[in-house]
Image: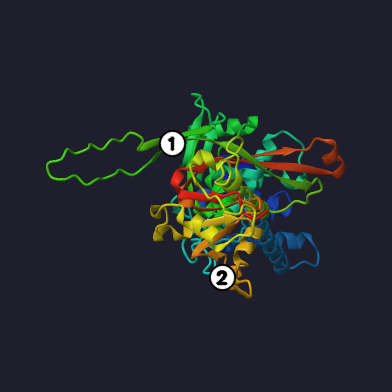
Amino acid sequence: MKMTEMLKTWLAENCDVAADASDEDMKAAATGAIADGTLTPEKLVELTTEKAVEDDEDDLSKMIQDTVAKAVADQMAKQTPGLTTDDVAGAIDKALENAKTKAQDDTDAKAAALFGGDGDEDKGTRVRVKAAAEQYSTTKSALFHAEDAKHFPGEPAMYANRQLETTSQLEKAVIGATFKSHLAASGRPLPRGLRMTDHDRDLMAYAMREMPWSGIIHGEGTEDLGAIKVDGRKLSDFEIKALLDDSDSGGQEAVPEVFDTAIITTPVLHGELFPLVNTVPIGRGSSVDGFSIGNPTFANTAEGSAITPFTTDGMIEGFDTTIYPAVGALEIGNDFEEDSTVSIGATIIERYGEKAMEWLDNQIANGDGTTEPKGVLNAPAGQSFTAITRAAAGAAPTVDDYESLLFSIAKQFRPASDRARTVFLSNDTTYQRARSIQVGAADERRVFNMTHTDYMLFGYPYKVQNDIGNQSCGFFNLKHYRMYRRLGLSVRIETGGRALALANKSLIVVRMRFGGKIEQSGAGSYSTEMQA
């Protein structure tokens, strides 16, 4: 029996033996304590494994077993009729083994509780809980238009001069958590599935530290000194604190950049008009003071003749654009079942992406320029487009009508490099009438062939937006349509009102901001005299 300081102290306190007694007296006291049950085998293991005198577990176990058996077995056998020394030694062995197993189980349980492991890791291995962000895949890939796409077949899907990528599982989870954090800031009661969880908070903490953000912190995009602009970059510690303050007050306008770009992916890949325009993301403001640049001119000058100096007057023109809000709404039942953060993020991307696609195409074609971006077919006189006057207004279209639209814009606005972006534009009915033009009164073959589903005319794409009236049709190089997009989507929830209450529903609103108009007046032609 090894006489450790811990064992000696315990014997002095519990067995009426002097603290400075000899080792032999201490061993005698220990033997007596074991015999009368005062010192259990488990306690003996604990007192003889002092850190300062740690031995190999097997040697320690064998030493304790041998010592205890030798010191106690004979005495216990004499006091208990029928017991042999071997019986006592076997009982002690079993008790010591149980004590060691219990100690190991306790250690494993503590490791699992503290670090999330199962306690079976190799000695020296530290176990830790995976962070929320580590539970999701970060795999992404570049996005390309399909080979049979209606525009840019097989080419990279571009937005704001960079190629779009698929949304990773982690990014979808962050989108879902961001969505829920905006709703939480409203202070309104929420369905269980849309309430913030600890997992969502961990994801938001990760996004604030590790992901780029866009938008405005502390302000509605004004020039207030307190407003902080973040434009596709990571946040500083100060900005994280400011963002948390904004979130608590419900004024959050900055969002992870992926929350902005993921919803735009659908219009870029599947829209009729939005993929063709020149999109410029902006970080703040409700208007943009821009400019457009014209081309200089040259003239022949005979030898000895005066040279007319070139003037830049009018070469650079103002291009001031107002930014308008647009909202998309989604109704959800208040019995909305709890879903994964990834699924919520994917739903937001899909549903709001589709609605954004519809709205953007409509604005580029029909926007009034007063409460929304200015469309190419609305109030075109202010844009100096060429207006086509038909010989028989309102009559069935002719080949000459479409030729007039095509050749009424200058050749420099119809370069081969812009072929995919230079398009005819009308609703589907007007397109059908164009493709139905016969070779002759007695010849029902179609002038533009029978390839109706390719949506082409004279080798140019024909784009359809069905909010356009039957009498309007145009031909435009949409590369010269500039659309500004304010960064930073915002989300709010509405639960009031009789209709929502009776339907047991809530209304979730996502707010975007866009502004745009054509930047080169000669880049389009139109007619408002097509067949009604």
**Foreground residue, 511 or 343?**
511
The picture places residue 354, in percent across and down from the top left corner, at 64, 53
Residue carrying label 2: 447
Regarding residue 379, the answer to whether it shows in the image is yes
| Amino acid bearing label 1 | Gly
Check residue 290 in the rendering and tell me which mark sits there, or answer none: 1
Name of the residue lying farthest toward the left: 304
Q: At 70% from the left edge and 34% from the top edge, which residue is drawn?
A: 186
SS state under label 2:
loop
* Rendering quarter of residue 501: top right
**Foreground residue, 526 or 193?**
526
Left or right: 147 as drawn, with respect to 172: left
Label 1 Cα crowd, 10 Å radius (few <14 / some 14-19 / many 20+): few
**Foreground residue, 104 or 398?**
398
Left or right: 395 as drawn, with respect to 80: left
Regarding residue 128, the answer to whether it shows in the image is no
